[in-house]
Amino acid sequence: MPYVAVTALSDVGLIRDHNEDSLVIGPWTLCGTVTENPQTLLFPLGTPLVVAVADGLGGQPAGEVASALVVRHLASLGPSLENEEAIRDALALCNRSVYAAADGDPELITMGTTIAGAVVLEKSLLTFNIGDSKVYGMDDDGLRQVSVDDSPPPAPGRRTTSAVTQTLGGSPVFTAVTPHVTASAVAAGDRYLVCTDGLTDPVPDEEVESVLRVHDDGRAAFELWKAAMEAGGPDNITLALVRIGE
């Protein structure tokens, strides 16, 4: 019977004093906490399954509140995310909800979050993102980024940038969002990585690819986390590995 295996972890890293990342896998959410070990969940292939990470904006208040709010909305909406339009509508709702939660509260004003994820359907996979959290596909040809970064080009001599040009919330006044949504066929053996920039900023794509060529599921998640920590763990690290089994 075809199934979806999702392995996830979330860690504060070595520099931050708390975790502003959140995660959703189907009806389950993990918000602002740390997993001791990678956790693997199995789901039948068929009903829409949403897997996403949200990275609360650093340097602005209550990033963990914004990221948790968004993943909880996606968890409740997950079974209805059957097409690209439904995903765009859901993300627009999440954006409005972040602004509504911050409205009139000086401790929450300008809170915001990125979002990146995938919805696994019976015969297709819909990837989406707003901000610079990422979705990758991994196959025999190697690692490829499926998401579209909402960020300016890095400064000369730099591989990454912390600036983002589009987020859910994050401004003093309401700003609409234009989600990036991509559809692709799904088949047994397909693998995807959904992660915050706490992994991809310190760990180059080539190193991520080399890990995924050798390892699957829990061991792959552990090795990716280890690589980020050995590179200094400068930010919260949250990732989910999605594998289509048969």
Image (spheres, rainbow, N blue to C red):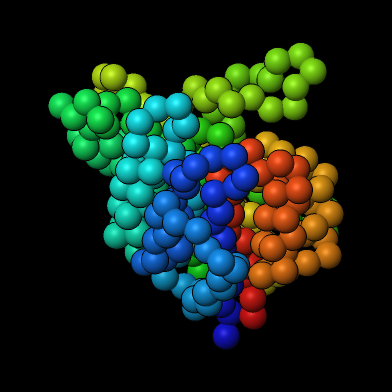
In the foreground, 152 or 104: 104
Residue 217 or residue 121, whichever sits in front: 217
Q: Is residue 42 left or right of residue 141?
A: left
Q: Residue furthest left?
A: 104
Q: Residue sitting at 15 percent across and 27 percent down?
A: 104
Q: Quadrant of residue 3?
A: bottom right
Question: In the rendered view, would you say 173 is above or below 12?
Answer: above
Q: Residue at position x 44%, y 33% from top? A: 57
Number of residue marks: 0
Residue at (39, 66) in percent of width and height: 28
From where the camera sits, is residue 8 visible? yes
In the picture shown, does residue 83 fall above or below 150? below
In the rendering, at what x and y percent does residue 84 appear?
43, 47
Q: Is residue 177 something one can see in this rendering?
A: no
Residue 53: where, in percent of width, then height?
A: 49, 50
Quadrant assignment, res 241: bottom right
Position of 171 compared to 19: left or right?
Answer: left
Q: Quadrant of the N terminus?
A: bottom right
Looking at the rendered image, the quarter that the C terminus falls into is bottom right
Q: Is residue 191 above or below residue 208?
A: below
**Nearest the eye: 211 or 65:** 65
